[in-house]
Image (cartoon, helix red, strand yellow):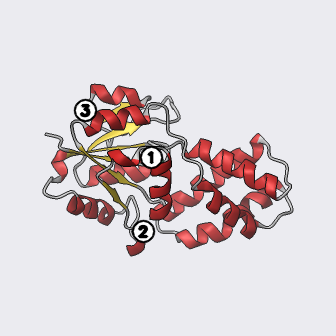
Amino acid sequence: MIQSVLLDIDNTLLDFNKSAKETIKCAFNELMLKFSEEVFDTFLRVNNSLWRKIEKKEITRQQLHSTRWWIIFDELKINADGEKMERLFLSNLENYAIPVDGALDLVGYLSGKYKLYTASNAPYAQQVKRLTLSKIMPFINGILNFEAQGINKPQRQFFEQCVKAMSPVTSDGIAFIGDSLSADMKGGKSVGFTTVWFNYEGKDVVPPDTCDYTVKSLSEIKNIL
Ligand SMILES: [Mg+2]
């Protein structure tokens, strides 16, 4: 029987894509660069590919920060300072906390039945600020983040630490909701969580068997939990 629910943050509770877009527009304005949809699409592609590399331990988080905007500017043939852009991007991102449709309603509903925790690879202070801004914070019993120990999703250790922090509940009493098939579903299944894949992009795909349930909107989760 499910007793606790673990929630991913970016593109599950908070709309990272919308927040990132606003942040980039604002930073481009400051750097007097012209924003376009192509800029945002390139950001998403490069950023996702770098995060997959972090998940596979091919690069470190620091390497993402030191290369991300240089790669994007290079691809877009924009002559600008990638280091300065990265700084602006990081410092502005925490000021945008746009909830995914139905996120507040969902945490209100779930908190009446379960203890709620978040599981994210994003920096701890940034998560606290964004969850507070979005008014989600009061519903959360604990923010689980092991960044300081260099442990990230989908490492098995990350999820083992989660179970420890959620004690005395054991993994068969934990449901995990997240948008990433690699970081969330695969990792969560490896320790025996009940997994709920939030198909954030509404992709037309057959979910892998690491997903016990699949939803395309957060409101559908009320039919499951
Ligand atoms: Mg996510």
Q: Look at the picture and state if 147 lies above or below 166.
A: below
The residue wearing badge 3 is 225
**What kind of residue is marked 2?**
Glu
Q: Nearer the viewer, mark 2 or mark 1?
A: 2
Rendered residue at 80%/46% (across/down): 35
The residue wearing badge 1 is 180
Q: Determine contact: label 3, label 1, CB under 8 Å.
A: no
Q: What mark, if any, has residue 134 been given in the picture?
A: none
Cβ of disc 1 within 8 Å of ligand 1? Answer: yes
Q: Determine contact: label 2, label 1, CB under 8 Å.
A: no
Is 193 situated left or right of 177 in this image? left
**What kind of residue is marked 3?**
Leu
* Nearer to the camera, 15 or 26: 26
Task: Say which label, 2 or 1, has the lower sequence index.
Answer: 2
Is 20 situated left or right of 213 in this image? right
Residue 26: give x, y in percent of width and height: 74, 51
* Nearer to the camera, 123 or 56: 123
Is 18 situated left or right of 150 in this image? right
Q: Nearer the viewer, mark 3 or mark 1?
A: 3
**What kind of residue is marked 1?**
Ser
- Report the quarter where the C terminus lies: top left
The residue wearing badge 2 is 147
Rendered residue at 67%/68% (across/down): 67
Quarter of the view holding residue 81: bottom right
Distance Cα–Cα, label 3 vs label 1: 19 Å
Distance Cα–Cα, label 3 vs label 2: 29 Å
- Report the quarter where the N terminus lies: top left
Element on which disc 2 rests: helix
